[in-house]
Amino acid sequence: MPADIVRQLDPIFKAKSVAFIGASKTPGKWGYRAIERAINSGYRGRIYPINPSGGEILGIKTYAGIMDVPRDVDLAVFTLPAEHMPGVMRSCMQKGIKGGVVITADFAETGEHGRQLQDEIVRIARQGGMRFIGPNGMGIWTSAVWLNFALEPAPTPGPLAFVSQSGTFGGSLAHIASLKGYGLSKFVSIGNQADLTIPDLMEYLAEDPDTKVIVLYVEGVKDGRRFLEVARRVARRKPILIYKGGSSPEGARATLSHTASIAGSNAVFDAMCKQAGIIQAREIEQMFIMAEALLSQPLPRGNRIAVIGSGGQGVVTVDALSKLGMRVPALDDDARHRIKEVLPPHAPVPGNPVDFAGGARTALQEARVAEQLALLDYIDGIVTNVPTTFSLARTVGAAARVGIEGAELLASIPEKYGKPVLTQRFRGHDDNLIFHILRGAGVPYYTTPEESALAMWALVRYGQIRANFDDSTGVLDD
């Protein structure tokens, strides 16, 4: 199946040529915006606008019909009225097009007539060997060929794949992800899932070398058994994070008119995710907080975490970790003695958390403490605060050298010791020297103890998921 799904979906995500059927010369219309976004994203393939009036759109020659295009076409993007879809779909089958994205709405989400129309285009596509996304979606972004006709602006390429059952809402979340610096390998607004479903996309993304973490926004699952089976296989290879809409009775009712989905029982869905090894987010932003850590940090061997902080910061971080089921073990006497030698003279004898007592310290001192903690076999991960008083524009001389050395030492710990390091930022400049070094090395920083704890929990949880899969049965023993 993996090789087959790659063959089927590559014409969509690695399209060398795209026909925009329903192309418009009117700025603001979907048929115009889709082409404009593809051009602005730096798409590397050929673009064929399809409009009966011919002429040009955005300086590109326009063809009256798909059969007039003189070369092969990999992907068709549909933005024409729903009632025209069956006839146009037949022409695409005659042309030999194997990939489609149907942005057009007014299908199953509108009632029985729309459902019949949707079933008809599915039947035509399957007879012709086309796989398509939608209808009633917003489009896709794929970093493989720099093709975007969904988002404005286009995302930054990166290792996070985001599949959303909502178009506008999913686009808003993708924009938030971009603002926070999370690059996307794929964005897919999947709509009604008339043909390609979330399990199909999970199978494809499992094989996608550009994707490290899969994030899903769903409102309902069409085939629970297949969703479970596919997710279980994929989660053994890549983390899957999910947020489910329609958790309230009112929200569940709204999903039916939104994407023709039946939300189903929350208890059943929760149990299915647990059995499959999917990590659930209870709030939207949690998905990206957890994803950032999973993208770059090694998985801890257990749930024993060390904290470096000052005063209340350390206490609150320990509380947040404990609430999520992680342990913050006391340090043994030997570790306390070795760490005390690194701390400023005014600092108390270290425990866990290691307290700098709010006084002056350097990034190098904090990094040396973190390294001592990483050496302990009963510590699986580290959460630390990093001084944020130095700006790149103002830092010079010895202070800059110490900051660089400390940041580089801290950034080296995950690879050197195989243990995750998460940092907390409470104040300071975005151009901070230390932030640049840590971010460049893939060490995340968060703004609250709760965020840091959640990110560490995701690493611990996925480590448990990977460790608990029985390779002979594929069953997650939790």
Image (cartoon, helix red, strand yellow):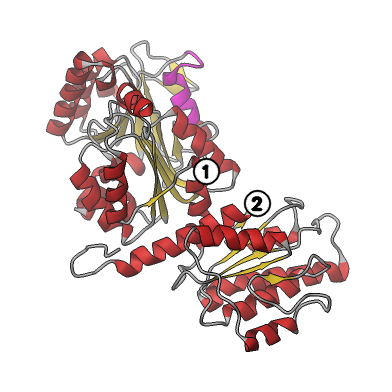
Q: Is residue 343 visible?
A: yes
Amino acid beneath label 2: Thr
Residue where numbered disc 1 is placed:
285
Amino acid beneath label 1: Glu
Mark linked to residue 12 = none
User: Looking at the picture, how far across and down is residue 364, in whole percent?
Assistant: 74, 73
On whether residue 273 falls in the magenta region, the answer is no
Image height check: is 410 above or below 455? Answer: below
Find the residue positioned furthest to the bottom.
Answer: 334
The boundaries of the magenta stretch are: 26-38
Residue closer to the observer: 27 or 113: 113
Image height check: is 328 above or below 93? Answer: below
Q: Which residue is at a point 64% across and 85% down the rendered structure image? A: 335
Find the residue positioned furthest to the left.
Answer: 127
Dot 2: what SS?
loop
Residue where numbered disc 2 is placed:
447
Q: Which residue is at a point 47% across and 23% down the rendered structure image? A: 33
Residue closer to the observer: 192 or 353: 353
